[in-house]
């Protein structure tokens, strides 16, 4: 009996530590660090280009930007808290810093309607929101991990400076992304 308890305890510990690793952004998701940022054609829901299909990387240009990818079917309160924390932190990093939050979805029209309500609730001040029309196929060059509930890509000067792929996420891990942005601004 004792052997079974130790075995079960060991399995549970490994599972918990395994989830903790994933929550720290250990999934390989996003374009290669150090390379140029790929084009990102999306339909914007908020911001100056609302209602237009744009290349979000062209719109942001050289400005420090955090691209945040959310699979529409995995959005929940934890993801909302994470996104809100990033948006608030960007306000402290200067007026040039911003985020582009991309929901990828197989039902882009319904997602656009839903995102209008999300924006009214979360009141993003430093983040524009857009939709990419596929859950199965990520935008060319973005290499999003299928298990990631969130992918954050920090870009400055049109180069990828850091990337984070999360199997689970909450507001407490948003500081990783903000710290990576600060580091890129100091370079």
Image (cartoon, rainbow, N blue to C red):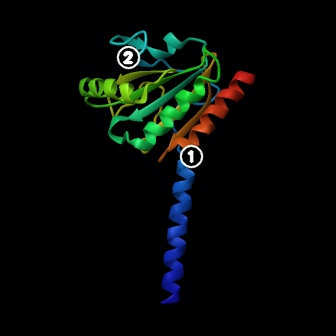
- Which quadrant does the C terminus fall into? top right
Q: Which residue sits at x=57%, y=52%?
A: 21
Could you tell me which residue is drawn at 62 percent across and 38 percent down? 176
Per the image, the residue denoted by label 1 is 26
Q: Quadrant of residue 137?
A: top left
Label 1, residues with CA under 10 Å away: few <14, some 14-19, many ≥20: some
- In the image, residue 9 lies at what x, y percent? 52, 75
Q: Which mark is residue 44?
A: 2
Q: Could you tell me if residue 28 is visible in this image?
A: no
Q: Mark 2–mark 1 contact, CB under 8 Å?
A: no
Characterize the local packing of mark 2: few (<14), some (14-19) or many (20 or more) Cα atoms within 10 angstroms: many
**Eyeballing the image, is 153 above or below 146?**
above
The image quarter containing residue 159 is top right
| Residue drawn at the location 55% of the way across and 31% of the way down | 86
- Between residues 42 and 113, which one lies in front from this camera angle? 113
Give coordinates of residue 183: x percent, y percent: 71, 29
Task: Mark 2 or mark 1: name the one nearer the start of the chain.
Answer: 1
Viewer-nearest residue: 28 or 169: 169
Tell me: residue 96, above or below residue 109: above
Q: Secondary structure at mark 2?
A: strand
Q: Would you say residue 175 is visible in this rendering?
A: yes
| Number of disc labels | 2
Q: Most extreme residue toward the bottom, as rendered?
A: 1
113 sits to left or right of 1:
left
């Amino acid at each position: 009996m004792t052997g079974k308890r130790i075995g079960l305890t060991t399995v549970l510990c490994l599972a918990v530590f395994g989830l903790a690793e994933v929550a720290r952004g250990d999934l390989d998701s996003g374009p290669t660090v150090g390379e140029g940022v790929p084009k990102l054609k999306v339909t914007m829901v908020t911001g100056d280009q609302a209602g237009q299909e744009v290349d979000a990387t062209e719109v942001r240009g050289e400005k420090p930007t955090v691209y945040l990818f959310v699979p529409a079917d995995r959005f929940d309160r934890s993801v909302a808290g994470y996104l809100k924390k990033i948006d608030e932190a960007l306000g402290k990093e200067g007026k040039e810093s911003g985020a582009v939050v991309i929901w990828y979805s197989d039902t882009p029209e319904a997602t656009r309607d839903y995102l209008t309500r999300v924006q009214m609730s979360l009141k993003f001040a430093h983040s524009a929101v857009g939709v990419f029309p596929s859950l199965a196929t990520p935008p060319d060059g973005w290499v999003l991990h299928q298990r990631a509930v969130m992918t954050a890509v920090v870009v400055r000067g049109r180069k990828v400076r850091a990337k984070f792929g999360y199997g689970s996420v909450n507001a407490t891990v948003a500081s990783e992304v903000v710290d990576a942005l600060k580091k890129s601004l100091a370079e």
